[in-house]
């Protein structure tokens, strides 16, 4: 009996909605695995994908806008990936497995990945939105490259600015404006800065450091109204004070973008609900990055988004990998401010955990380790990151520390070693880039920072590893103004 020849499998149509950092990482991982399916990426912005984390570096003037591009249009075309920019998705039709665009056209899919990220939410401040729905001319959001360029265009005429929000983004924007020569103030409704990441003591050290650098901070105060007196505006606080200003930058508040998924009938809570395979209730639809909710939590950080992208690429390539959750690794990227936060257990369990802490507000240093059974389960470092490599390595590996080691890790060093000395001491298996999970050995195998960025994606996340990577390859840092982190002041 003759067997009928089998028909070759039709390549699946993989459609990715979103063109941010998670989406780029997914496409890279799919190509690296040799996935030959048809891949289409639908991006709402008209720019090639860029590193959103480094927008504050563009605002500060230490990075050129083109230096934060992740992948060019030519790269997509050269790898056979269809990239559509300026393309807004209006609906997902699950019955026909099609994505409907704003112009009414449809894109069919076999596998759909939602990487829609998060969207800013406007704080309830009267007057920031005009009757026609546009932001007041003095008010700026800071979420996209277009937002950054608009703010940059307004900076030369500004003398004072108020940043609403004392989170990671707010502090980065405030420092960038200060470096540009703008007298900047921060308004934070919570009791201390970075309240979602650090405790009150660390927040107080941060505030003191910022004020020493010339940035005034108002905590426990909420902006309630924008007043307009012609050439100058004011921001009224709920404590009765009004801050005169030229610019107001909104960095407080954001939520996962779930409207598209909700309208498609997918389960959403804060984010789009996914399981360990990163699939939604519809097995043909997946979600990764800021918009995804796994195990009841959303992340908002680069490392878990990239980890999810890697897991999903493996599964779409026929693998059986699963996503088991994330670890928090947050870095503040701002000139003269050093902050790193590891882990979710910033509030220790009183009967199980030990806290080792050293704080010197005058020197602007605060170090805190939460240790459980000899293992670091959380860490906060402010003002001194000389031990961040070792602490991260112990945290990642679950290393059981000796009795004296936690104290030694937070004790101020007698002298600050050069970056080259620190890099030379790192073992090859030490993690250098937490965002991409890259070891020192992989970096040392590269010939330059540019090669390390291209082949390992180190330095292309939060940027916190850039100095170490440069030291490991003994080369200049590409993409920075003048090849160095020079401060750019307003003339």
Image (cartoon, rainbow, N blue to C red):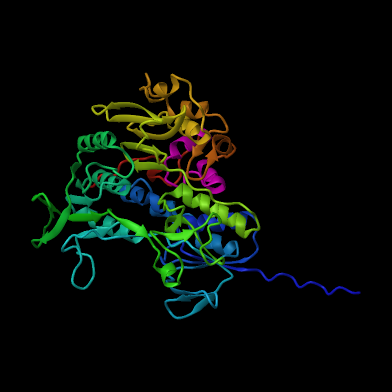
Q: Is residue 412 above or below residue 316?
A: above
> Dividing the picture into quarters, in which one does residue 354 lie?
top left
Q: Is residue 461 magenta?
A: yes
Give, as a single range, the part of the protein colored magenta: 448-473
Q: Is residue 247 above or below residue 434?
A: below
Name the residue nearer the viewer: 18 or 182.
Answer: 18
Q: Is residue 219 above or below residue 35?
A: above
Q: Is residue 12 magenta?
A: no
Name the residue nearer the viewer: 63 or 130.
Answer: 130
The reply to whether residue 143 is visible in this rendering is: no
Q: Please, which residue is most extreme toward the right here?
A: 1
Where residue 72 appears, x then y in whole percent?
50, 59
Where residue 334 appears, x then y in whole percent?
33, 42
User: Viewed as shown, does residue 405 lie left or right of 454?
Assistant: left
Q: Please, which residue is most extreme toward the front here?
A: 351
Location of the N terminus by quadrant is bottom right
Q: Is residue 84 above or below residue 64?
A: below
The reply to whether residue 281 is visible in this rendering is: yes
| Callout count | 0
Name the residue nearer the viewer: 439 or 491.
Answer: 439
Q: Residue at x 33, y 27 (%)?
A: 357
Q: Residue at x 23, y 68 (%)?
A: 134
> Dividing the picture into quarters, in which one does residue 368 lie?
top left
Q: Main secondary structure of the magenta part?
A: helix
Where residue 350 appears, x then y in whole percent?
35, 32
Where residue 142 appears, x then y in whole percent?
30, 56
User: Viewed as shown, does residue 380 lie left or right of 156?
Assistant: right
């Amino acid at each position: 009996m003759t067997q009928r020849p089998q028909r070759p499998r039709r390549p699946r149509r993989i459609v990715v909605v979103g063109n941010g950092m998670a989406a780029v990482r997914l496409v890279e991982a799919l190509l690296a695995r040799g996935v030959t399916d048809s891949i289409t990426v639908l991006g709402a912005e008209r720019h090639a994908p860029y590193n959103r984390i480094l927008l504050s570096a563009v605002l500060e003037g230490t990075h050129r806008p083109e230096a934060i591009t992740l992948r060019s249009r030519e790269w997509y075309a050269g790898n056979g990936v269809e990239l559509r920019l300026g393309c807004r998705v209006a609906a997902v039709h699950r019955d026909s497995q099609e994505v409907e665009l704003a112009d009414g056209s449809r894109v069919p899919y076999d596998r759909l990945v939602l990487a829609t990220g998060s969207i800013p939410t406007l704080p309830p401040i009267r007057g920031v939105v005009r009757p026609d729905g546009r932001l007041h001319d003095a008010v700026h959001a800071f979420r996209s490259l277009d937002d950054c360029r608009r703010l940059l265009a307004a900076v030369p005429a500004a003398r004072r600015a108020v940043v609403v929000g004392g989170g990671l983004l707010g502090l980065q924007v405030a420092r960038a404006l200060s470096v540009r020569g703008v007298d900047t103030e921060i308004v934070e409704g919570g009791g201390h800065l970075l309240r979602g990441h650090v405790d009150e003591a660390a927040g107080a050290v941060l505030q003191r450091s910022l004020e020493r650098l010339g940035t005034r901070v108002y905590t426990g105060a909420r902006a309630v109204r924008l007043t307009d007196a012609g050439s100058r505006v004011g921001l009224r606080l709920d404590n009765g004070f009004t801050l005169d200003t030229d610019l107001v930058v909104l960095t407080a508040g954001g939520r996962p973008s779930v409207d598209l998924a909700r309208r498609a009938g997918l389960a959403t809570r804060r984010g789009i609900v996914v399981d360990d395979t990163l699939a939604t209730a519809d097995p043909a639809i997946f979600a990764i990055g800021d918009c995804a909710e796994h195990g009841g939590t959303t992340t908002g950080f680069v490392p878990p988004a990239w980890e999810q992208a890697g897991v999903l690429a493996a599964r779409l390539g026929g693998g059986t990998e699963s996503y088991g959750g994330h670890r928090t690794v947050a870095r503040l990227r701002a000139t003269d401010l050093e902050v790193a936060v590891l882990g979710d257990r910033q509030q220790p369990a009183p009967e199980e955990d030990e806290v080792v802490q050293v704080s010197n507000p005058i020197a602007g240093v605060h170090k805190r380790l939460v240790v459980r059974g000899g293992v670091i389960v959380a860490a906060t470092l402010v003002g001194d990151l000389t031990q961040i490599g070792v602490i991260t390595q112990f945290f990642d590996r679950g290393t059981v520390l000796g009795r004296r080691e936690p104290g030694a890790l937070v004790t101020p060093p007698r002298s600050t070693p050069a970056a080259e000395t620190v890099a030379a001491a790192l073992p090859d298996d030490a993690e250098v880039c937490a965002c991409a999970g890259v070891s020192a050995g992989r970096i040392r195998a590269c010939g330059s920072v540019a090669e390390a960025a291209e082949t390992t994606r180190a330095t292309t996340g939060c940027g916190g590893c850039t100095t170490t990577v440069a030291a490991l390859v003994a080369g200049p840092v590409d993409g920075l103004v003048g090849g160095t982190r020079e401060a750019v002041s307003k003339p």
